[in-house]
Amino acid sequence: MPDLLTHVLVAYAAATVASWRYEWLGPPYVTVAMMGAMIPDMTKARLLAPSYRVESLLGVPFDWFALHTAGGSVVAVLVGTLLVPSRHRRRVFVLLALGAASHHLLDLLLINPSGHSYAVLWPLTGYEPPTPGLYLSTDRWPTIASGALALLVGWVDARRPGDRGADG
């Protein structure tokens, strides 16, 4: 799935570059940002449990797509933040949010027949911003480009002086 890999590679590159500025941002935290980039695609759970089945089980309106919006991402980030010890929560929150935000930003560039993206800022607004339509989620070139970027950032990171610990 080139789309998910692209999101993870971009989050890796962004978090690694941020680690050059913030000493505490070691490899475990870079991984947290990469996990954050996968949050909006939790909507893929609909393949195992369609929305209508969950809706009938819960007895309330339900749609997996809500996870692929800013509101759904914030809820997932908050849940993820609660799963770590309190001393790491602020950093984990920021990095999960960074990963999820990078995912949404990349998705706003997708080609859509309507010329508009999805309601990314739901539940604040149902506005669907126009999209420049740079690529399809099935295109391979964004994955190749993000892979090249990740390799370059990893190469530069490996050659940077200093010992960055993973303690946080």
Image (cartoon, rainbow, N blue to C red):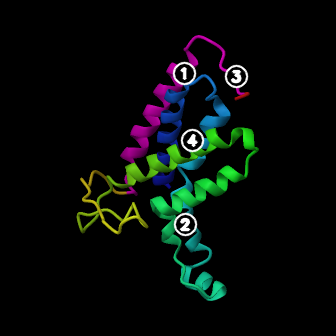
- Give residue 121's position: percent from left, percent from top: 39, 61
Residue at (58% x, 11% y) in the render:
161
Query: CB under 8 Å between callouts 4 and 1?
Result: no
> What are the residue bounds of the magenta stretch?
137-166
Dot 2: what SS?
helix
Decide whether residue 157 is among the magenta residues. Answer: yes
- Give residue 114's position: percent from left, percent from top: 24, 68
For badge 2, the amino acid type reads Lys
For badge 1, the amino acid type reads Asp
Q: Which residue is mark 2?
A: 44
Dot 4: what SS?
helix
Decide whether residue 143 is among the magenta residues. Answer: yes
Q: Which residue is mark 4?
A: 95
Image mark for residue 165 = 3
> Which quadrant of the view contains residue 25?
top right
Residue sitting nearer the eye, 135 or 39: 39
Of discs 3 and 2, which sits in the foreground? Answer: 3
Q: Residue furthest right?
A: 85
- Give residue 135's position: percent from left, percent from top: 31, 53
Total marks drawn?
Answer: 4
Q: Residue furthest top?
A: 161
Of discs 1 and 3, which sits in the foreground? Answer: 3
The Cα–Cα distance between marks 1 and 3, rounded to whole angstroms, is: 13 Å
Check the image and report above or below for 64 versus 41. Answer: below
- Considering only order in the chain, which callout, 4 or 3, is on the residue closer to the N terminus? 4
Residue sitting nearer the eye, 65 or 3: 65
For badge 3, the amino acid type reads Gly
- Considering only order in the chain, which callout, 2 or 1, is on the residue closer to the N terminus? 2
The Cα–Cα distance between marks 3 and 2, rounded to whole angstroms, is: 35 Å
Check the image and report above or below for 1 versus 25. Answer: below
Of discs 4 and 1, which sits in the foreground? Answer: 4
Residue at (31% x, 62% y) in the render:
117
